[in-house]
Each structure stands twice: as structure tokens, then as C-alpha cells.
Amino acid sequence: MTILPKSKLGAILVLVFIYIATISLSIFFFKFITLKFELKGLNAFFSADIFATLLLWLIGVVVGNPCVFDLQWSIIPPVFLFSFYLYNGRVNKLEIEDIWFIGTVLFWAVRLTFNCLVNWGGFDHIDWRIINFKNKGALAWFFINLTSIHLIPTLITFTSMLP
């Protein structure tokens, strides 16, 4: 049994903490793999993205709600974008096209995150489709949860951000 807040504000604050922790750990993971394994560029970003996904999947398993991952669609792209510009030393050399692109992604991300949080029912709310998947059995649920609900959306989000 998990101890999660019942209030919407409390649940949102827990989500904020989860995403700050996940992003922070992913940054450390990124630095580790670039130094230890000399993984560079998009391969390192992809590895860190998968690492973040696995963390969010594990948290979703622990709290009993895979919907923790829902904000990944809107939070990770701006983080990835900023990190990519920072990694490539382009933060101080932004051109007007970069500013428009970053602004568009940020506008989209803030709007999508806001809409998601406004409509979110807290940790007790689980999407009806997920409930249907859970009813297919423990082994089927494990693979559906890990692949269809977590890894495939990560692949979609990551490839949509490729230059």
C-alpha cells in the first residue's frame, strides 16, 4: 500500500517531485555514460531517455498507476531540446529560427501539461483502457505496461525531436 495524497494539489506536487527527480537522475546517467562508456550525441540522449522511461515505469509500478508517465509527452521534449542545445554549445549562439522553434515547443508543452493536469483525477484515477489491459493477466500486463504504455511513446517522442 502506498501513501499518496488524495488531494489534487498534493498529487500534482508529488508528480512535480517525481519528474524533477527523474530528470535529475537522467542527467547524472547521461554524464555517467558519456564519461564511462564514451557514448556521445544522440546515442547518449537516447540512452538517458530510456533510463528516464524505466524510472517512470518503475515509479508507476510502485504507486500502482502507470498514468504517472502521461506527462512524459509534454515535459521531456523541452528538457531534451534545452539539453541538446546545451550539449552542442548552442545556447549562447541561438538564431531567430532556434528561438521560434524553442518557443513553439515550450508553448505546446506548457499547454499540453496544463490540460493534462487540469483533467487528471489524481493517483486514484486510472484510464479505463489501462484497466482493460490490467485485466488481461499479470504477464500480459507487464509487457503491455512496459512496451505499449512506456517504451513505444518514448520512441515516438524521441524520434519526433530528432533534428
Image (cartoon, helix red, strand yellow):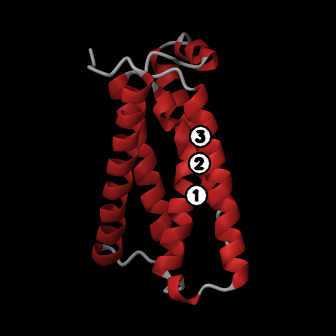
Q: How far from the left and from the top, in percent, is residue 15?
A: 40, 37
Q: Quadrant of the C terminus?
A: bottom right
> Residue 118: which quarter of the image?
top right
Q: Which residue is mark 1?
A: 77
Q: Are marks 1 and 2 in contact (CB under 8 Å)?
A: yes
Marks 3/1: CA distance? 15 Å
- Give above or below for 140 relative to 117: above
Residue in view at x 46 percent, y 22 percent: 122
Q: Amino acid at mark 1?
A: Pro
Residue in view at x 48 percent, y 28 percent: 66
Marks 1/2: CA distance? 6 Å
Q: Which residue is mark 2?
A: 74
Instruction: Depth check: give the residue in front, 26 or 21.
Output: 21
Mark 1: few/some/many CA within 10 Å (<14, 14-19, 20+): many
Marks 3/2: CA distance? 9 Å
Left or right: 19 with respect to 148? Answer: left
Q: Amino acid at mark 3?
A: Phe
Instruction: Depth check: give the residue in front, 35 or 60.
Output: 60
- Give above or below for 72 relative to 132: below
Return the disc, 3 or 2, that comes first in the chain's sequence. Answer: 2
Q: Could you tell me which secondary element the residue under label 2 belongs to?
A: helix
Q: Which residue is mark 3?
A: 114
Q: Is residue 71 visible?
A: yes
